[in-house]
Each structure stands twice: as structure tokens, then as C-alpha cells.
Image (cartoon, rainbow, N blue to C red):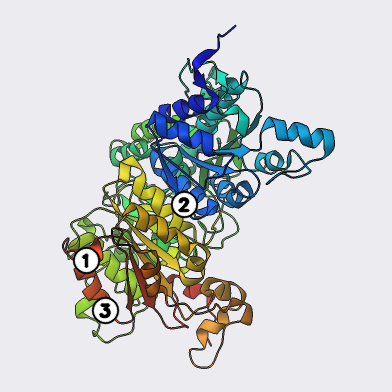
Amino acid sequence: MTAIDRGCTVARYLALRLAELGITHLFGVPGNHLGPFLSTLRDEDDIEWVGTPTEGGAGQAADAYARIHGVGAVAVTYSVGAFNLLNACGGAYVEQVPLVAVNASPPYEQWQNYRAVGLLTSHMSPRAESNLDVYRQVTVDAQVVSHPGLAPGQIDAALTACLSERRPVYLEIMEDLWDEPCPAPEIPIVPRERPFSARNQTMLDHAVQAVLTLVEEHPGPDGRPRPIVWAGEEIDRFRLGEQLTGLVEVTGVPFCTTVGAKAVVDEDLPQFHGVYNGPASHPDVHRVFKDWATCRIGLGAWSTSKNLGGEQSVGGDWVMAALGGVSVGTSYFPDVQLRHLLPALQDALVKAYGTEGLAADYFAESYDHHGSPGDRPAALAHRPAALAQHRASLRTADTRSHRPDGQHLTYDGVFDRINHFLNHDTGEDWTVVSDAAFSLIGSMNLSLPAGGFLSQVSWLSIGWSVGAATGAALAPEREDARPMVFVGDGAFQETCQELSTHTRLGLRSVVFVMDNGHFYGIEQMLVHPEFYADRDGAEPDFYNVLHPWHYDRLPAVFAGGRTPANGVSVSHTADLDDLLARLTDPADPLNAGPLLVRVRLHRHDYPRAMAYKVPHP
């Protein structure tokens, strides 16, 4: 029997285990039930407490932190805090983000009083398992800790499940247990991977052979294979970026990414052919991915409506390796892990076609065969003269010389200029954090280094980006990068107070609030897209209209003498160019703390990628 360590308590046990996982910051909103744990956390001095204005914002910060660092944690108080956190935990569950949710509950004594005489105290519900029941729906393990002797086993089981399943877990711990003695940590917490057996090897071999057969059965008109890889979210979640880079470099196969896996590897790789997002893709990317490539190999890609731009399904010329199995056309191979598939597929492709045997520039080949599209967007760099020898790359040209300074800003104009800034003007590292809707559509074609982009592409909780920027800035792997946030005005109204956390911590974030005239632009596009075809008299549906805010004035509310924050408003191209120039000057006061930029756009403007939805007469 394990002896009780009188120097270890339940609070200290959990603090030590979280530190062991490499967690450096714990996000949350305090309460009396949580207080003893936070005091212990401070005494241990391994993990910094980051209090946020809202539980939802704390969850968003922990979510982004975990996406970068590998695991994150958030702590709240029972019921009123836990239910506010539920949305963020639900998003982490859907998007496979390892998150530890700690919920401090009323003490054991109060639960006994309730059972005996029906006495309810603060935050308690007549349904004693109410918090546990809801969190069971959005976690892979949920525990109520009510006995100090059992606490270590329950905590270890939950943390092991979090690392192994790469999804959230829930620990509900009663207040009077925090200071109770318990056994000290012994065996390290490690993920438990699924074993790889002879049966798995056979299934893997069959899956790889099926992929090769699909490639062979879908050649181009010249008889050569013409596959393209579609790298997805699980490349990031399972930390397989190096394996993906190795596969595309050794085989030469061109690849795109999903929106959710944008910048999972360096987008300067010559094999990179852009972000594929169905009809919402850049026209050139859509052309080579769907029309020029003859088969598509999804590696860790999720077939969500956002990744597919509204398409309802993939086709028989697709491979989809995700969620623990591989679909090849109409065949399915269960229990094939992505970490085993990538090296096996690389070896098989090299054996079949030789090193760099699949190397190709699909942009150049497509243009050479069909000719360059007459309506080719200005955002695409000019093709080199020796078309057959160079890859057409998605790069935003310097548009400042092509647009008058007095021209009103557009979604596309903003992102064109931001792309040029990130790739040519700034000397700093940035992490782009994009919210849902038009901000996500506009930012998906920015050219970014590996790890330089975060988005919540499946759950799509509006306002996620503002809180997420906090976690992105504090994750050790990106702590030297400044967060650059793109968020719609309606989304920002959901979580604007999280800018207070940026200010409090001195984060030098830049938050672009895309103000399109105070209404929900994406909701209008989804319900009545014809609004965008009439730039004169059409009005948005009444339920999409927002109360107008002076967004650029909000930083004055959060700023203090030692915690500066600034706000500016830009309406024209010259305004944005001047602002971006100031961002390159370390001595400029705008760079001393968070900066909120109100980007004023025309009510009928929308990203060109959404044009396929707008009816035209």
C-alpha cells in the first residue's frame, strides 16, 4: 500500500503533475472553491496563474496554448464558472486539442449537508452530477475527486487520457480536499499509444498498396501520375510536421493544406501549392487541386464543411487518412495510424517512382497546357519567363503602387497589404490568429512560416481569436512572436474584454477588428447572399444588425499608467500603409502594448473567395 506523504497534498499533487507536463501558465477565473489550489500553485512557483475576465476567454487561451505547446490547462469554479467554460471545452474536444479543465467544487461537507437536509450553498445544483454529466459529453475522461487517497489515481488517469487521446479531460475537485495529504507523484505521466501488431502491419500494407493503385489508375493525359497531397489538422495535433516535410521533399509530390492546417509546415517549401478550401479556395489553387491533379491524398485532413468550402463529400479519386483509419476510394482500412502511414507511404512512393519522382509544378503545367486565366487575380505573383522551370507561387504583390492612397479599404485589399507586410516589411515574428467567417476566408492565403497560424476551423465559435491570442503569446514555442488577430466586429463584441488580459500582461498584440458597418456579414452571406449583389439599396436582415461601437476607443478603458494600450481607426489604403510602417518602428508608442485597429469597410464588401455564393444577374 502506498504510504501517505505528509508533505504532499491533493493541491500540490495536481500542481506537480501539471508542471511535469510542461505547462507554464494556468488560465482561469478564481473563486473561493479554487483559492487553496491557486495558493499552492504560487508556492510551487512552476506555473504562472493568468486570470482572465471570463471563463470562456480562459478556455480560449488554454486552447491556443495547447495547440502550440501540446497540452494546456484551465481552472474555474463550480457551475457558474464551469458552464461558462463549456463552450471552449467543446471546441477543444471537436478539434482534438489536449486540455485539462479543473473545476473546483463545494466541499464534501456541504454535499453531505445537502444529502441530509437539502441545504444548497453557492453554485450548487439539486442535481449533484450536473457538472460532471455535461463535461462527459466533451471530454475523454471526467472525474469527481472526493477522496484524498484516491485523488492521485484519478488525476493520473485523466492526464494520461488527455495525452493519449489528445482531447480534453475534466477534473472536479472538492474544496476541502485541496489541503488533504495524499501519496506523492511517482511514475511519470506518459501517453499510451495504441500497440502496433502484426495485424496492424498487414492493414497498413494493404492501405499503402491501395493508395499506390489509386495513383496508378488516375494518370494525367501524358500517362504520368499526377497526385496531390492534402495535409490536414492531424499533422499538427500528432506533431507530424517533420514527417510530412520529409514525404513531400523526398517524393517531390505537390501538396496543399486544409484551412485548419495552414502553416503546419513552412509555406516556402517548393512543393506547397496553397490552401485548398473547396469553392472558397484561391481560383488558381482550386484549378490545380481539383482539375489538374488527377487524385487527391488527404493526410490527417478532416472533411468538414469549412475545409471543403461547402462541398458535401469527397470523391472516388480521393484518399482520406484521418481519425485512425484510411479511406481509399470506396475501400476502408481501419486502425491505420497516421504516424505509421506517413513513412510507409513515403517508402512506397520512392520505390515506385524514385526519389523526387513525383516532383512537379502543377501551376506551371496547368498554365502551359491551358494558358493563364484571363481573370487571374492581382494577388498572384507574375509567372517567371521560364514557365516550365519555375513554380507559380502564391505571393501577394506590393499593391501600394497600384491603388490610390484615397481608395477605401476592402477585405482583399487589407489582406494583400498584410501579406506584403509579413513577407517583406517586418523584422519581427508574428503568429496570425484568425477568427471565424470573413476573417478566416481572408487570412487563409497569407504566406506564413511553420507555426505562424491559428484558427478554430471546425467548431467556429465567434470571438475565439481574442482570447486565443493570449495563449498563443504565452506558449513557450511562440513567446517571441507577436499575435496578429483578425476578427469580425460581431465576433469581437462577444469577447472584447479579453483585450484586458493582453493589456494586463503587456502583450504587443495587434487586433484588427473588421468593421463592415455593424452587422454579421457571414450570417448574411449564408442566409441571403443576394444582399452582396446589390451595393445600392439592400439592407441586411434585421437580426444580423449590430449595435455600432467605437472599437478604437476601447483600449483607453483597459489601459493604465504602466499598462499602455492603443486604438486607431483606418478607412483608406494610405491609413493602413501608414499604420504598418509604424509597426516596424520599435520606438513607436503604438508598439508598447496591445493595439486595436478598427478597419472600416463598406457594408457590401466581402472576400473574393466567397464570390461563388453571391448570385449575379
Amino acid beneath label 1: Pro
Residue at horizontal 61%, vertical 81%?
Answer: 541
Q: Position of residue 292 (x, y in %)?
A: 40, 58
Q: Residue furthest right?
A: 117
N-terminal of the pair, mark 2 or mark 1, is 2
Report the residue marked by disc 1: 589
Q: Is residue 132 left or right of residue 265?
A: right
In-front residue for pair 113/352: 113
In-front residue for pair 332/612: 612
Q: Position of residue 457 (x, y in %)?
A: 50, 55
User: What kind of element bears circle 1?
Assistant: helix
User: What kind of element bears circle 3?
Assistant: helix
- 482, above or below 280, in the image: above
Amino acid beneath label 2: Thr
Report the residue marked by disc 2: 52
**Which circle marks residue 575 in the picture?**
3
Amino acid beneath label 3: Asp
Q: Nearer the viewer, mark 3 or mark 2?
A: 2
